[in-house]
Amino acid sequence: MIGKWVKSLIHTSQKKLSENIDSPWYFFGIMFLAAADMFISVLPTDVFLFTTIYLKPKKWLLASVTIAMGSMIGASLICWGLEYQREWVMNSVFPEVFTHPKWAQAERFVTKWGLGAVFLTGLGPLPQQFTLILAVLGGISSAPILFWYAVGRLIKFIAYGWIASHAPDFLRFINTEWVNFLSSQNNKSVKKQKRSS
């Protein structure tokens, strides 16, 4: 039941967005959805990006940066909220986790590798919430977490946007050049066969 509701919500959102792509609020809408994805985790930000670029290919950079900024807003809310409530979470919500001897080992690991993991998570397609939460609870300040997360998200969405906006032209170019090359090779071999016969 929930799965059908979520699919319906995504389909309706995508349809409404594509119908209103020329509206002044459109890019704020996809930014809001990207921020909400940090809390809901089922909104396909990549699909919103590709739909926007398909409908408005010249706005690929704006769409890419807008979705990256939306992800950053959501990540900021998670990190700052958790940083503000860190002690309460550690002492009240999951005290057995944070008093366990393995937690000290986990904190050392997060301190050593946490920012690299945040950067790689920002680049990747997997949910980012767990990495962000673990980095904050591991004692890393929100500012460097958000910086490296932003760098990862910008690289990811700008690369996706550029590929999505340039792929049709690139594929047409490859197709035309490849067909011309094969045709010319075929013509040469036909001419060689005619000469040898």
Image (cartoon, helix red, strand yellow):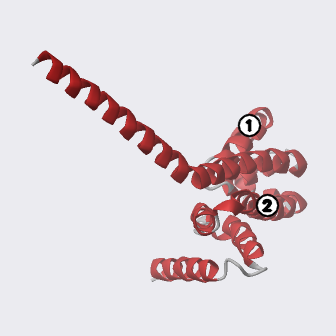
Left or right, 111 with reference to 84: left
Q: Secondary structure at mark 1?
A: helix
Residue 125 in sight in this render: no
Q: Residue at x 85, y 62 (%)?
A: 88
In this figure, which residue is indicated by the disc labeled 1?
116
Residue 99: x %, y % from top left: 76, 48
Q: Quadrant of residue 43?
A: bottom right
Residue beneath disc 2? 69
Disc 1 marks a residue whose amino acid type is Gly
Residue 110 in percent (x, y) is at: 75, 39
- Report the number of discs: 2
Q: Is residue 31 left or right of residue 193?
A: right
At x 64%, y 70%, the residue is 40
Q: Dot 2, crowdedness within 10 Å: few (<14), some or many (≥20)?
A: many
Q: Nearer the viewer, mark 1 or mark 2?
A: 2
Looking at the picture, tell me which residue is in the foreground, 83 or 14: 14
28 shown above or below 120:
below
The quarter of the rendered structure image containing the N terminus is bottom left
**Residue 111 appears at what percent x and percent y?**
80, 36
Instruction: Residue lying at the far top in this picture: please name it.
Output: 196
Report whether residue 72 is seen.
Answer: yes
Expressed as whole percent of the image width and height from the top left, the position of residue 168 reads: 52, 53
- Quadrant in which the C terminus appears: top left
